[in-house]
Image (spheres, rainbow, N blue to C red):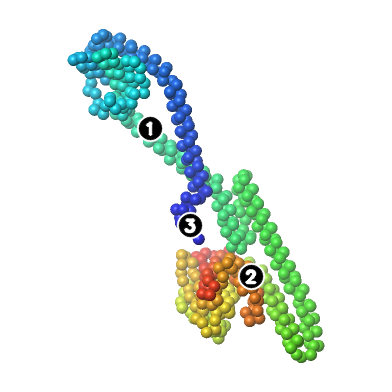
Amino acid sequence: MRRKPFKRIFHSVFTRLLVAIIIAGIAITIVVIGGFMTLRKHSLESIDRNLALYIDYLITELGDPPDPERAERIARRTGMIIQFKSGRQQWETAEIPATLRMERARIFSRHPGREIGFYRGHHFIRIHQGSVHLTFILPWAIEDNKVISRFFAVMAALLVAILTGAYFYIRRVLKPIRHLKVGVEKVGAGNLGHRVPLGRDDEFRDLASAFNRMTERLEALLKIKEQLLLDVSHELRSPLTRLKVGLEFLPQGETRASLAEDIHEMERMITEILEAAKIRKSAASLNLARTKPADLIRIVLPDFENRPPGVIIKNLLEDELMLDAEKIETVLRNILDNALKYSAPGGTPVAVFMEMKNRYLTIIIEDEGIGIPEDALPYVFEPFYRANNSRTRETGGYGLGLSLCKTIMTVHNAEIDIFSKAGEGTRVVLSFPLGSETS
């Protein structure tokens, strides 16, 4: 069962790597900021001493008691607001911002008679002795807002650039994984000639190389197996001929008839194996021509008209495709033969119809026969595999038909899918891509 798109993205290796990079970046940032704060904490004493000397210098320059005119000059020079309170006397060099609330300020340095605080961008130093209070305020300036806004804009742009670069870099690094995934799908579909690009000299190259060696060995083993089967089939023809000659010398009777039937069945099996191998070898050289699949259905159908429970056509489309007509006829004959063979003689007729789905022209053949067990579906295209292991004379066949159909459809760049439930019937779907030439 396919995962939902969001869940698939969330569980992908790419997403997890990207999340790991982001988390690592955040962790590194926290460590750096933590280290900076630790150093800042240790340096506060030195800052406090220098700041205390500077404030002492300002207090000396203001005079005792502080002179408002001198305070005005200092305020113009430093950009600070100076506030003085002593009993009934109170003055300030400029209006204190309404956004500065001393009672809510954060005091990050406190000494006898002196406090350094911060509130919403405003910094202040408050000197107090008895009833005398002298406050130096550095207000939050509009220019500071612009500088900080620019700073955060640059930071955001850099962050986006870093994440974008990380995204494309991870995609580039994981590209061999995508090639390998395609390779697994191709080989799983029976295309053992597919090879994965090797790419850069890294671990993924080693993995791709190992995968290619594996498929080469599998292809070689299957060829050896097929050649062995062909050789055995050829060799069996001679002893079978001798058996048939010897059979002629036996007297008529039940024993002779039984032996003759066994020999005939062995001959049919050998002939079918050799014919299937012949078609597989010729599949690489397709005789392509513009053909209507509907016409092929009409050509094949008369061969099955008199077989119960019969075949009905529901809908045909008159589109043309580049096909090898003879080989597609073989596919249709095999599938129709199976559909009728495993349907009850008095049951529902086998239905044949065509549909257009997602740029694919599909031929669908449905029956309501005995069906195929679910655990057997992954293996129905394997040579000599049969869901019903009893190869009786009544059903015939040796499990080569669907394997041959799969080979023919694959070389046409087309697909064959089987959907079935035991006791309910089988649906075979042949999907041909539109607008693409067969290679």
Classify mark 2: residues with Cα within 10 Å, few (<14), some (14-19) or many (20+): some
Q: Residue at x 41, y 38 (%)?
A: 157
Q: Which residue is label 3 attached to?
A: 3
Quarter of the figure with the C terminus? bottom right
The local secondary structure at tag 1 comes to helix
Which kind of residue does numbered mark 1 sit on?
A: Phe
Does residue 52 sit above or below 416 in this rendering?
A: above
The local secondary structure at tag 3 comes to loop
Q: Which residue is label 1 attached to?
A: 151
Does residue 36 sit above or below 420 in this rendering?
A: above
Q: Position of residue 341 (x, y in %)?
A: 58, 79
Q: Which residue is label 2 attached to?
A: 385
Q: Position of residue 298 (x, y in %)?
A: 52, 80
Closest to the observer: 416 or 97?
97
Q: Tag count in the figure? A: 3
Q: Is there CB contact under 8 Å for labels 2 and 3?
A: no
Q: Is residue 241 left or right of residue 117?
A: right
Which of label 3 and label 1 is nearer to you?
3
Cα separation between marks 3 and 1: 42 Å
Which of label 2 and label 1 is nearer to you?
2
Q: Residue at x 43, y 20 (%)?
A: 43
Report if residue 294 is visible in the image: no
Does residue 263 sit above or below 117 in this rendering?
A: below
Which kind of residue does numbered mark 2 sit on?
A: Tyr
What numbered label is drawn on residue 407?
A: none
Q: Earlier in the sequence, mark 2 or mark 3?
A: 3
Q: Earlier in the sequence, mark 3 or mark 1?
A: 3
Q: Position of residue 100 (x, y in %)?
A: 27, 26
